[in-house]
Image (cartoon, grey):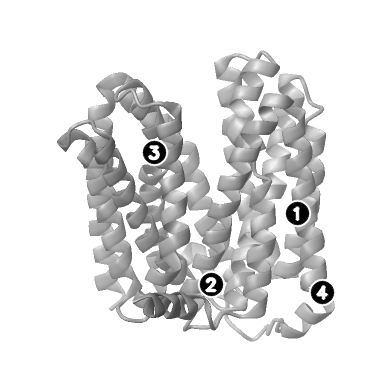
Amino acid sequence: MLAYTIQLYKNAYSGLSKNSWYLCIVMLINRSGTMVVPFMSIYCIQQLHFSIVQAGSIMALFGVGSITGAFTGGKLTDKIGFYDLQVGALLSGGLLFIVLGFQHTFITLAIGTFVLSFCNESFRPANSTAIAHYSTNDNKTRSYSLNRLAINLGWAFGGALGGFLASVNYHLLFWVDGCTNMLAAVLLLILMPRSKVAKTMKKLDKAVVRISAYKDKIYLLFIVLSTLFGMCFFQFFIMQPVFFKIQWHFSERFIGFLMALNGVLIAAIEMVLVHKLEGKRNGILYIIGGVIAAGIGYMLFNILPPTTITAVLIVIFITFGEMLSMPFMNSFWISRTNEYNRGEYAALYTMSWSAAQVIAPFLGSNVIFYGGFNLLWWLLGGISMITAMGYWYLYRSTN
């Protein structure tokens, strides 16, 4: 049994290109420094003495910058290539994180946050395009799962380190975040020299017809559905911890364990799960299963008693929903692209998640204010089921 398990994990991680692993390392370093954003609201209120409304406005500007940055990043990726844009976004983002730490007025911090988010988020379409470029039809879903693994591990490490640094000095967050961004850029330059990358990139053929993502009706439906799912999924990190604290009265330590459980399950299972599922059935079917699993997880809040076992079960449901859906969402958008429009498709997909991240806290807080947590969980479950039906229609339309 042990030998079978070892072989299973070995198979799950084998066959990926060297450059896919390099991109994973760059992402891990980049995300390990992600600590300013999670603590920005607290920093604004406690250190700069902004009002809650002002702090919320700063975070909203971060979301707006993310959307516009993703859009521009996608356009630039298709024009100048994914390599230069990744290096430029990492270097400029790193520099801007450090500069942002010296902004102490609402206006300067607001402008700085928008510009930083714009530059920082332009990295994602380029990175997604690079992963697609260095993967094959047989391993593209696993290549994105490897990238997700790096993001989750980096986020977990960055959050823990950020909490420690914030207790010492909030300005350290800006310096560490900025330096890790620039370190990631340097690593990219060392591990994947531009001269070698240029040899693998095809020159644009002007004779090829480039289909615009904004005219692809099937893809636009997919984007709407992805945004709906994202609005529900982000409640897992936004409103669910609040619920555990004020409604079920769990300790911060146990809530932290539940959040860590999500990352541990992804790190331990997702690559093997994708390896076993990839190519067996149409990926949209797995997306449907994942969306339904997440919806059931939210509805269990109103069905099962408020115990620690229930909380763990809910986290497992939502995490498995994430692991089933998100890797195959990446596969779907890649399948509709070619070398000449991949940046635009990647940008639109990134924008859908950025929009969901902006909408989710507004939706969750207002539903709770007017109808309570119970209404929120039923609503999220209902939206998930409607979204699953939308994906079923997408499946029937593409087969």
| Label 1 vs 4, first from the N-terminus | 1
Distance in Å between CA atoms under marks 4 and 2? 21 Å
Taking the spot 45% from the left edge, 69% from the top edge, the residue there is 271
The vertical placement of 184 against 376, above or below, is: below
Residue count near mark 1 (Cα–Cα under 10 Å), binned few <14, some 14–19, many ≥20: many
Q: Find numbered disc 3 in the image and state the secondary structure of the residue it sits on.
A: helix
Q: Is residue 139 visible?
A: yes
Left or right of residue 387: residue 162: right
- Position of residue 240 measured from the top left corner of the image (x, y, whole percent): 37, 34
The answer to which of 278 and 342 lies nearer the viewer is 278
Q: Find numbered disc 1 in the image and state the secondary structure of the residue it sits on.
A: helix
Circle 4 sits on which residue? Answer: 194
| Label 1 vs 2, first from the N-terminus | 1
Tags 3 and 4 touching, CB below 8 Å: no
Distance in Å between CA atoms under marks 3 and 2? 27 Å
Circle 2 sits on which residue? Answer: 143
Residue type, label 1: Leu
- Position of residue 112 measured from the top left corner of the image (x, y, whole percent): 74, 34
Residue type, label 3: Gln
Which dot marks residue 71? none
- Position of residue 58 measured from the top left corner of the image (x, y, whole percent): 62, 28
Residue type, label 2: Ser
The vertical placement of 354 against 77, above or below, is: above
Distance in Å between CA atoms under marks 3 and 4? 40 Å
Circle 3 sits on which residue? Answer: 235
The vertical placement of 363 against 388, above or below, is: above
Distance in Å between CA atoms under marks 1 and 2? 21 Å
- Position of residue 362 measured from the top left corner of the image (x, y, whole percent): 43, 30
Distance in Å between CA atoms under marks 1 and 4? 15 Å
| Label 3 vs 2, first from the N-terminus | 2
